[in-house]
Image (tube, rainbow, N blue to C red):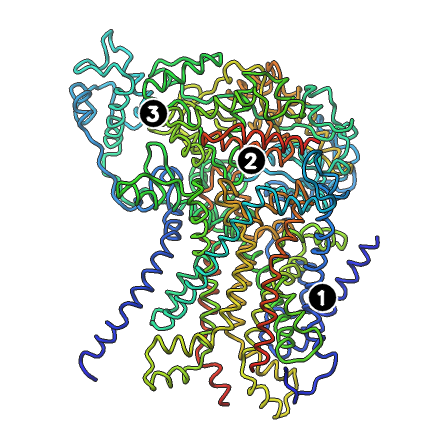
Amino acid sequence: MTLSIMKQGRWTPFLYLLPALVIMFIFIIYPMANTFVLSFMDKTGTQSAAVDCMPGEPCWGVLENYRYALTSSDMLTALRNNASWLLLMVPGTVLAGLFFAVLADRVRYEALAKSIIFMPMAISFIGAGIIWRFVFALESGGGQQIGILNAIIVGLGGQPVAWLSTPAINNYALMVVGVWLWSGFCMTILSAAIKAVPTEILEAARVDGANEWDVFIQIMLPMIMPTIVVVTTTMVINVLKIFDIVYVMTGGNFGTEVIANRMFNLIVTDTGRSMAIAIILVLLTVPIMIFNMVRFRQQEAMR
Amino acid sequence: MKTKIWHLTLVFVVAVLVLSACTPAATATPTAAPKPTDAPKATEAPKPVEVPTEAPKPTEVPAEAPKPTEAPAPASDIDCTGVKAGDKVTVMYQWSGGEEEKINAIFKPFVDACGVQIVAESSRDAAVLDTKAKSTPPDVLFWPTTAPLNLYAAQLKDLSTLGASTENFADYWVSMGSKDGKWMAIPVKADIKSIIWYSPAQFEAFGYTVPTTLEELDALVEKMAADGNVPWSMGMESAAATGWTGSDFVQDLLLAQQGPEYVNGLISGKVAYSDAGVLEAYKLYSKWASDAKYTVGGAQGTVSTGFLDAIYKVFQEKPEAMMVKQSGFAGGEVTKKFPNLQYGVDFDFFAFPGIKGLQGGADYMMAFSESPATKALVTYITSAKGAEVWATSGFDLCPNKLSTGKYTDAQLIKKAEALYNAAGFTPDLGDTIPAPFGEAEWKAVIVAAQAGDIQAALDVAAKAQAEALK
Amino acid sequence: MKPFSSINRVLSRLPENLAIIFMCVVWIIPTLGLLVTSFRTSEAVRTSGWWTALSPKQAASSAEYTTYCASCHGSDGKGVASVDLSNPAVLDKYPRTNRLLAMLRQPVNGEAHVKNPPLPEKAADALAIMTPIQEHLQTLGSGSQESVWSGLTLRNYADAVVGYKGTQDYLTDCEQKNPSALAKFKCDLTDVFNPEGMGSALINTLFVAIPSTFFPILIAAFAAYAFSWMDFKGRQWLFALLVGLQIIPLQMTLVPIARMYASLGMQGTFVGIWLFHTGFGLPYAIYLMRNFLGSLPREIFESAYLDGANHFSAFTRLALPLSIPAIGSLAIFQFLWIWNDFLIAKIFLSNNPVLTVQITNLIDPRGGNWHIMTGAAFLSFIVPMTVFFLFQKSFVRGLLAGSVKG
């Protein structure tokens, strides 16, 4: 439902879209088609994936790489981990970002406070790796603890913890790094949306005697809902392809494997499997695509 | 050919579209930074600062090398046949920082003599190499494993046609660098791995003596533990590569318990990785690596202490352990960290006791091109002059036989002796076996260090071995 | 104004202020750790926590020295004329306690060196005594108490800026007029632009990042406008596809694009890397912009059209100015992703290294000199933070309200 009053040539929309479509076609869709083809090929990308089958082992023929991507124990761990990353990190970052965007909007030192939350975004992932080394570091010999967490624990009389190599803890430790890194992103986008809520409406509600919580729930939240959806969608996608943190901190060892790390590890030595994992990753976004399409329609119908 | 035209068309279309789309916008937003039409010009002559296109080596002036037309006067022992001054050789290697300085120093006599420009790129990333190899391969590649042999066999050139001679290298080096009868990789820089670093002064203070058999080592370890000293510093954390230090350790144990034949059998697939002999080595490794009595911090310390920190722990002010099993490079790391320590007194190494063959690693030279300048570089590196320059540069060992007797550094002399006198030689398993197997092997090492179910981990590795070597 | 109203206001806002401050503290501690670390020597970093950097060192105990040594050498270390223990050169001969012990176990003039009381027999016990003695001797040598600041250094930064790859550090090499350093450096301010250092990499990075931020946003704005306010077939499908395109891992595209660039001779050109970043920035940029433009009130555009505006003027006069907050946040993130990108720059622009690539060129393969990276990480951090501050200004409240009225 667009503006019926507005005249528009049949090709005008495509004039506006074409540069974007062409560039995305070359840099994303064409390589992806290449990936799709390679996902049915063997290690070196020259023959059908079926040649990689082992006698006496299950074999999916030309879909052999997909058998690996969906049933191998490494990939099952990765899929499970990605699911818990999604469940914990997406709400974690969005809520922390929203919480901060709303609160910081109300204080004078807003710019400074927001800069602090934003700061991790400005650090490359190699830098972030070093930073968190000094948080999680473990000295298990006789020396001083140089990791701040273990220093606090030992200072309180506890036993130091191997944050990154203890399977029950390490995934959560990595997720904390993720929340630390990405909350600034959510905060910035949400903050832009909050700034776009007209002051007059908020003031009118306050004059009518609404308390701050009501103003937030009944006026602010509905108005920034589209942005919350955008931020959540983006975070779901970012978390699905989470890679840097795991690669730098544990390399996927000790049960911290994730899908994208598996894909990257295999990209040179086993192209076929790596590409099949990439396709799985893309397929995982289909529900998000459908959700966004539905919302797109609703939004158009409403305005 | 078809794809090329396709690419060209696409890019042309994009360029036209970008320009046409941007033009109205540029008028609407006059503050816009670079005008789109300026963009292509800017890239033809980008040089925002004078960044030389070669790996910057300020001391050389290759572009304006002397006497452009006539063949540069060859220095007596460097062969520049067919090379024109200003010819380029693109090289790629993993060396960076101080190591890059050393390789530049080794290139220098060649660059000076032949007037060649070396355009170098340093990258440790296999994905970067892969992308380059499949698009714009370097003329010469230096890589610390022979993996490119399997990945790019069709593109790599036979080095015997580029002026290298198999006579100058031990047979095992030649066979390691050959595939299907083509000699494609020459070891240029070698490091020995079957050694244990210790402090002679510390040993003297406690009255310990250097063991010569595996039984003596075992007895020494028990004695140290009984004295209340921690014998080993076995930390092996190395981010995504965690496991390689332990893998080296296990291989040395295998070389002592079973011998080089057995290890080569593991590499070729003749011996399954789940074999009883492998289990035996893993069990001893696990006993030491998972117990705080034998190694700093026990299992936790082994998997979470960085491999460099593990070295420092033996030589720091208050040593936390007596020995660290690490390759030859450890000596350099000790000197860098503690410059006041003296080789031979404060730190030294001994051969892994009872070992029946040496474990070593090497950086290999491979060529993707047959250009005259490439040939001249390969010829230089493998020549007597190149071997001498390498040996005196202090950049680890030079496997070229012509380097014999040319070392000047005490540590290198001792290492070279160990290398040349080795009864047998096995390459580092982790560097040689195909990656999925290597990854499974590292995982098995981690399981052993954490005193987990070793046999199960070995079964997984054996499966990966069978799959990888099929 | 009632006298207590301002206090009341402060009190009623206390919880939210506390919450903000608490969150800020939690967020800043890890980074603060890196900042402090970047001023410390690598040995200090390895052996003690960064939070100890500013606490004064504990004075070494002199009890063991008094027991075993003072009777002959005197409390000032000058008791034996031939061996002045307060001379640092004497101490330098014993870099580790085991060397000191070995020397003390050597007889002097046919008698035990330390007799009254004798050293413990067991090596471990003897070594335990050596440590405080050695530490005490060090204070004799240096004479004065070490300053709190002595543990801090600017050398990590100096090494990073000039691109030092030697075995000591840049400043020391220059002080000593080390020939290997002089071959590469001039040891004056021009070293800041040494091609192997961070200075030249900074310029390369800016030259990559600015166009790569500008182009995708511009192209995305056009596309987003079409998605929001124009009608055409397949709109919803195309938009859903855009959402999905964001997931495509860029590692998948490296080989096909590198091959294409190689066949076109675009390998290592700035245009190549601009286009690549544009391609990968577009899906998200269009997605975000379309959601923002799509949520603008319909009336604004209707009244504009009734006033005779066409699509292009509605786009430039209404849509673009109104979406400044969205463009602002988009620009920040696009700029940051490019700024922190390593892989694309490494592969497509290796001849003009950007900051992230230059840093890895400085680090030894085994990471023995990683402390240089702490300084480098902070240097590369300044520009993005400045950008954030600048773009903060584009988040202005009331932009929209004004235009609805007008």
Q: Nearer the viewer, mark 2 or mark 1?
A: 1
Q: In this view of the protein, which residue sits in the foreground, C258 or B119? A: C258
Res. B388 in view: no
Question: How far across and down, in percent of the image, does residue A144 sit?
Answer: 32, 37
Secondary structure under tag 2 reads helix
Q: Residue at x 48, y 63 (%)?
A: A185
**Which amino acid type is shown beneath numbered disc 1?**
Val
Question: How far across and down, in percent of the image, does residue B31 sit?
Answer: 58, 75
Kindly give the residue lying farthest to the right in the view shown. B1
Q: Quadrant of residue B394?
A: top right
Q: Residue at x 56, y 57 (%)?
A: C205
Q: Is residue A10 above or below residue C212?
A: below
Secondary structure under tag 1 reads helix
Label 2 and label 3: CA atoms lie apart by 28 Å
Mark 3 chain: C
- Mark 1 sits on what residue? A22
